[in-house]
Amino acid sequence: MAERLGVAIVGVGGAVATTAIAGIEMIKAGSNSLDGLPLADRDVAGMVAYRDMEFGGWDLADDTLGACALRHGVIGEKELADGAAVLNQMRPWKAAGSTGYCANIDGSNKLTGGHRGAIEQIQADLARFKDEKKLDRVVVVNLASTERKPGDDAALQSREAFEQGLDQDDAAISPAMLYAYAAIDSGTPYANFTPSVAADVAPLAQFAAERNVPVAGKDGKTGQTFMKTVIAPALRDRALHVDGWFSTNILGNSDGLALDDPKSLQSKLGTKKSVLNQILGYPVEDHIIMIHYYKPRGDDKEAWDNIDLTGFMGQKMQLKLNFLCKDSILAAPLAIEIARCLDLAKQRGEGGVQEQMGLFFKLPQTRGDYDPVHGVPEQQLILDNWLGDKSA
């Protein structure tokens, strides 16, 4: 009998989460192809099949996932009637939330009882989910809205201080950190698809290594940054010097609303700006990134780039890119593959930071104090070597 994997999602009512769940349910029903799933053609021993994945999770909104999906506008009544009807029966579990960390996102479906109480409930939810769905294993994936960056508070400097901060309900400890702690403490793999600080904060990275629990993150590499890390290696290899790279984005979904808060926006910009210098091997002085919340666009994001280049004999050139994409349609398959890879790492006994999963993230978490690899060709090779599958 095939083994079953549960994916517990933070922000399960969001556009990315509902799209991922709908897509897998439609695969089960035979009404969806495997297009867009990067590892669909891989034959990897121990990797769970898409049909053997079950979903649940937490959200501050208490609507059914079907109602949430319709509100986001990525999928509609057609998909709900064509294999994804289960979303109409699914409701989120009560979630940890803080307007101090995410000013524009709140809801009534909120956990109470302080930090320790929230962790206890999150772990109880994981245990109940595994039992009710008769799952072999569970992973946690954070798909929630972007939180502001924390400060250099004492509670975030050591394991001992973090534990004391939990006891004292220290405001320096964010909701994202509570989920990461709860997962690691229960031996459950955790991935951070958001720019928020979570398992990459020093005490939690240490905790994951001590407990040998796989963790990965952060900030899913979907649209503009994906294209940037595909094109920049090619420009490097052709010795075309990048004089400047101007990037702008407009989007109108809940992610865009969260980023309309300047403090959350700074977290996002931090993960997007880090890639060019590492790939090119020199600093790009004029690397400018702008993100604008534009409500009419919904999930149909537009990413526009202008690249100024210097070539042979000092001749100046420009490259312009315009990526009209559906944010959640790009992100949902990555979240699915991240869950499958984390589960595979767990089965292989590989705990701590999973650097081989850097392909999926804008700012890949590393095991030490060194820069991650950002270029897609290099990242793909690292992942392929780790998978060790027959088709790579």
Image (tube, rainbow, N blue to C red):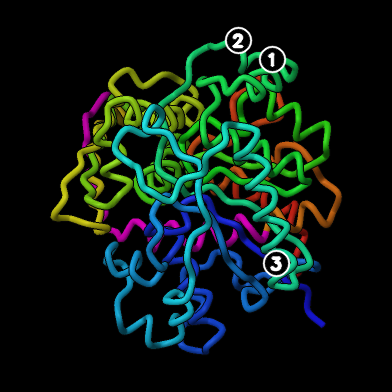
Secondary structure state at the residue bearing disc 1: helix
Determine whether, in the image, residue 253 is placed left or right of residue 280: left
Label disc, if present, on residue 161 of the rendered structure: 1
User: How far from the left and from the top, in percent, is residue 137?
Assistant: 76, 62
Residue drawn 80% across the image and 68% down it: 45
Q: Which comes sooner in the sequence, label 1 or label 2?
A: 2
CA gap between label 2 and label 3 equals: 37 Å
Of the pair 324 and 52, the residue shown nearer to us? 52
User: How far from the left and from the top, in percent, is residue 88?
Assistant: 42, 76
Residue drawn 63% across the image and 51% down it: 140
Q: Is residue 155 above or below residue 328?
A: above
Q: Is residue 291 visible?
A: yes
User: How far from the left and from the top, in percent, is residue 329?
Assistant: 38, 63
Q: Which residues are magenta?
A: 314-340
User: How far from the left and from the top, in percent, is residue 62?
Assistant: 40, 59
Label 3 sits on residue: 5
Residue drawn 68% across the image and 29% down it: 204
Any magenta on residue 337?
A: yes
Q: Are marks 1 and 2 in contact (CB under 8 Å)?
A: yes
Label 2 sits on residue: 154
Q: Amino acid at mark 2?
A: Ala
